[in-house]
Image (cartoon, helix red, strand yellow):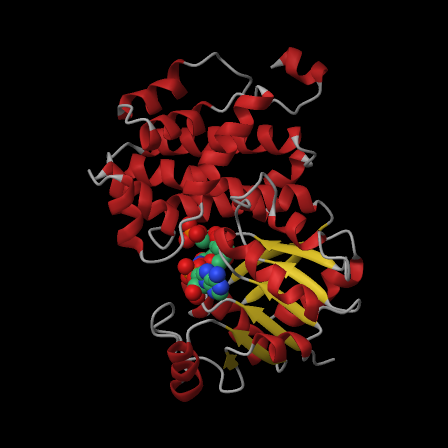
């Protein structure tokens, strides 16, 4: 069945997803603020600022008419950075109907209060057909046709099936999860550790250290997420380990590049300014460290990075806090019996 879809956001990920769905034969409107960008995409089939090397499907329609894009769609993907997510969702609320499906692809927290993007979506009184999409999904690689796996999480089977129907292609495979909390938290939290890994890479640490940092990152992520209701097993999947590997090892990751720039001597403003795209990990770091403090959650890597970025602490404090913090179980979600034997 062919669907009418709206993608909110003219950035790299929104464009990559819109292009897959247009290639799959669905009617796709990609809404963006910038009129010149709309004109460029419709006239040239290119989004030169975000995906300059990805010719877009000729049926992909860019538009700045939000009302029309939402009204004509049965499915809405929100690919707006977390800092603006709430304000955009408030604009579309009067345009929603009970049958519409809403999918967040945004990996971050609402900067206005500690909540995830799906929480923002759930506040609308019209439709609760809501899902989240996450996983190792570097937009430029998707646009280049690299084989990619993603995970759609929703308690609603029809929502999961709709996303699979829209996005499944020879190079884009969509897996399912019912653990929305875990999938969404994994996607947001991994950006913190992408900054840590970019920073470590700039310091030429070896593969042993990188592997230790990534493994302990997964431990911190899942410790935080389980406290807020996630299934720890989710972190063994695409949204957890998968996205952590992709984002912590690739210069295509904006968060990794922020970390690398800082490790190369730039301050935070220079590093973020030099990227020219969103780096969700900076806001996520602030909010997660605050919440971890409130709830007594042990997150030495996140705390050390926060001191480095926001309190001018020395780099050694970050590596040091990981190496000298209180010794923790290697895997802490085994049963007590298994732990006692480890
Ligand atoms: N780029 C990637 O590889 C992936 C990104 N994501 C997530 O997708 C979300 C969107 O990221 P990208 O598309 O990569 O960001 P981007 O930085 O490439 O583009 C952001 C887009 O949002 C638009 N925007 C910002 N504020 C707006 C507002 N108030 N109203 C309307 N439009 C606004 C910008 O104009 C821009 O077109 C982020 O949360 C990111 O973590 C998820 C998976 C992969
Ligand atoms: O989430 C992403 C890949 O899965 C993109 O990561 P960055 O936002 O760090 O570029």
Task: Measuring from the top left, give residue 2's x and y in whole percent.
Answer: 70, 81
Residue at 54% x, 86% y: name it: 59
From the viewer's perspective, tell me whether residue 4 is left or right of residue 188: right
Residue at 30% x, 54% y: name it: 275
Residue 336, located in which quarter of the rendered image? top right
From the viewer's perspective, tell me whether residue 106 is left or right of residue 227: left
Residue 314, located in which quarter of the rendered image? top left
Q: Relative to 308, is 35 above or below? A: below
Residue 186, located in which quarter of the rendered image? top right
Task: Measuring from the top left, give residue 49's x and y in whole percent.
Answer: 34, 70
- The residue lying toward the viewer, choosing from 308 and 166, is 308
Residue at 34% x, 18% y: name it: 320
- The residue lying toward the viewer, choosing from 29 and 54, is 29
Image quarter of the C terminus: top right
Q: Relative to 61, is 250 above or below? A: above
Task: Measuring from the top left, give residue 137's x and y in whole percent.
Answer: 50, 57
Q: Relative to 258, is 295 above or below? A: above
């Amino acid at each position: 069945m062919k669907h009418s879809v709206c993608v909110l956001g003219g950035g790299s990920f929104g464009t990559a997803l819109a292009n897959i769905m247009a290639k799959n034969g669905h009617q796709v409107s990609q809404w963006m603020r910038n009129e010149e960008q709309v004109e460029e995409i419709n006239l040239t089939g290119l989004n030169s600022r975000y995906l300059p090397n990805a010719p877009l499907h000729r049926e992909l329609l860019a538009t700045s008419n939000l009302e029309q894009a939402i009204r004509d769609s049965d499915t809405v993907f929100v690919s707006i950075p977390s800092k603006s997510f709430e304000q955009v969702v408030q604009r579309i609320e009067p345009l929603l109907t009970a049958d519409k499906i809403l999918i967040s692809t945004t990996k971050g927290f609402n900067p206005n209060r500690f909540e995830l993007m799906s929480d923002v979506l759930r506040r609308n009184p019209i439709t609760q057909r809501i899902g989240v999409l996450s996983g190792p999904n570097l937009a430029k690689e998707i646009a280049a046709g690299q084989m990619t796996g993603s995970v759609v999480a929703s308690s609603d089977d029809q929502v999961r099936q709709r996303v699979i129907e829209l996005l499944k292609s020879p190079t884009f495979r969509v897996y399912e999860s019912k653990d929305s909390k875990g999938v969404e938290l994994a996607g947001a939290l991994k950006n913190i550790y992408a900054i840590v890994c970019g920073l470590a890479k700039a310091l030429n640490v070896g593969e042993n250290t990188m592997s230790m940092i990534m493994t302990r990152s997964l431990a911190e992520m899942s410790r935080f997420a389980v406290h807020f209701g996630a299934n720890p097993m989710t972190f063994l999947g695409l949204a957890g380990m998968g996205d952590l590997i992709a984002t912590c090892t690739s210069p295509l990751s904006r968060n990794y590049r922020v970390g690398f720039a800082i490790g190369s001597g730039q301050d935070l403003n220079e590093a973020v300014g030099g990227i020219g795209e969103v780096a969700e990990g900076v806001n996520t770091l602030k909010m997660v460290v605050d919440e971890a403090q409130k709830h007594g959650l042990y997150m030495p890597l996140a705390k050390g990075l926060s001191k480095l970025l926001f309190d001018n602490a020395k780099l050694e404090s970050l590596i040091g806090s990981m190496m000298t913090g209180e010794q923790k179980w290697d895997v802490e979600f085994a049963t007590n019996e298994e732990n006692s034997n480890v």
